[in-house]
Image: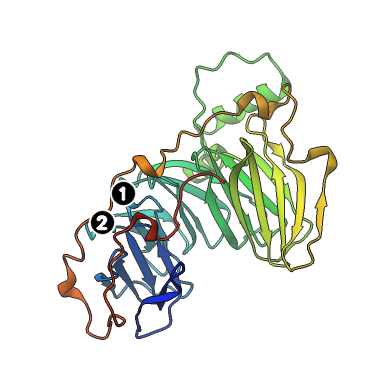
Amino acid sequence: MNVYHFKKGTEICNYSYSSKILSIRLNRQRLVVCLEESIYIHNIKDMKLLKTIMDTPPNTTGLCALSINHANSYLAYPGSATSGEIALYDGNTLKTACTIPAHDGPLAALAFNSTGSKLASASEKGTVIRVFSIPGGQKLYEFRRGMKRYVNISSLVFSMDSQFLCASSNTETVHIFKLEHLTDSRPEEPPTWSGYMGKMFQAATNYLPAQVSGMMNQDRAFATVRLNISGQRNICALSTIQKLPRLLVTTSDGHLCIYNLDPQDGGECVLIKKHSLLGSGKTEENKENDLRPPLPQSYAATVARQSTVPSTSTMPGYSEDGGALRGEVIPEHEFATGPVCLDDENEFPPVSIRDP
C-alpha cells in the first residue's frame, strides 16, 4: 500500500502486507486495510499502525465499512463466514463495540450513514435489507427488496440526511427506501376496497407464523428506477443538486445517469441526463426533466430545505493520540524515508460530508 501527498506529488509512506489487499477504507481519523483474514487500523495523522485484528472469518471480497464521520470511527465487517453476523469495532477506542445478528445467510453489503449512527446491511440473497442503530445494534428498519429471485447487491448507500437508503444489484431495478416509521396517529382513511384489504392483512399477521407475518410487515421500496441494462454491476449515490434530491447511477458500461427523486410521493424516478464516461463527451438530456430549478408549484420546490447535516467546521477535532498504542506495530511495516506529520487541516484526505 502506498500513500501519496497529491499536492506535493510525494510519497508519504508505504507498507507491505503478508497477503493481498482486498479493500481500503479511510476517514479523517483512521485508515483501514482489509485482508482476507485480518484487518489493519492506522492512525491517519502519522500512519502509525494502531491495531491489527487477526483471525477474522474468511472475507474473500474484503467486505467492510468505515464511518466517514471521524468522531464516530466505527468499523463493520463480517463476524462469520456462514451467517450474516456483523462485527462492530470502535476505531477510536480500539475496542469491540458489539456483534449484530443481522441475517441468516452470509453478508454481501454494508454501509454507514453520514454521521455513523446507522448501519445498513444485506445478505447474499439480497431480498431483505436491514438498518441498525449504532453503536447499540438495535434493528430500526427492515425493507424487502424482492421475493421472486435472489440478487447480488452491488451498491448500498444512504442519502446525506439519512432519510433515504438506496440499493442496486445485478438486476435492472434500483430500489430507494424511505427511513420513516408510520404511526397509528394518522387520520382515518376513507373506506376503500384496498384499505379494507390492508386492514385484513394487518389483522391476519397476528395469527400467522412469525416468519410469514414478519415478511408481510416489511416495508417495500418508496421509489424505483428501471435501468435499460441487466446483469451488470452499478454504483449508486443519493445527492442534492441545486437543492433538489437526485439519484446518480454509474454503470459498468461507462455511463452516469441522473434521475429525479420525488421526496414526497416516490414512485418511478425520471431520467434527467445521461453522460458517457468513456471519453466520447456525449450527453443525452431529457428536455422535459432537466436540472433547471422547477416552477414553484412542483413538489421539489415546496420541500426543498437546508440540510441538517453539521458542517465539518463544527465537528470534533482530530485525535491527538499520535499512535499511543504504537507498541503493537508489526516490524515488517516500515515508514518511508522522512518524517510523516499531517498537522495542517488542508493536508488531510479530502473527505467531506457536504452535498455537492
- The percent coordinates of residue 247 (x first, y second) are 65, 46
Query: Considering depth in this image, is 38 or 106 the residue closer to the camera?
Result: 38
User: For mark 2, does the 10 Å Cα neighbourhood hold few (<14), some (14 to 19), or many (20 or more) residues?
Assistant: some
Residue 171, picture quadrant: bottom right
Colour scheme: rainbow
Query: Considering depth in this image, is 299 or 350 the residue closer to the camera?
Result: 350
Residue 185 at least partly seen: yes
Q: Amino acid at mark 1?
A: Ala
Q: Residue at x 23, y 80 (%)?
A: 330
CB atoms at circles 1 and 2 under 8 Å apart? yes
Q: Is residue 109 left or right of residue 238?
A: left
User: For mark 1, does the 10 Å Cα neighbourhood hold few (<14), some (14 to 19), or many (20 or more) residues?
Assistant: some
- The percent coordinates of residue 254 (x first, y second) are 72, 66
Name the residue carrying label 2.
92
- The percent coordinates of residue 148 (x first, y second) are 67, 54
Give me the disc on residue 71: 1
Element at label 1:
helix
| Marks 1/2: CA–CA distance | 8 Å
Does 154 appear above or below 14? Answer: above
Q: Quadrant of the N terminus?
A: bottom left
Give me the disc on residue 15: none
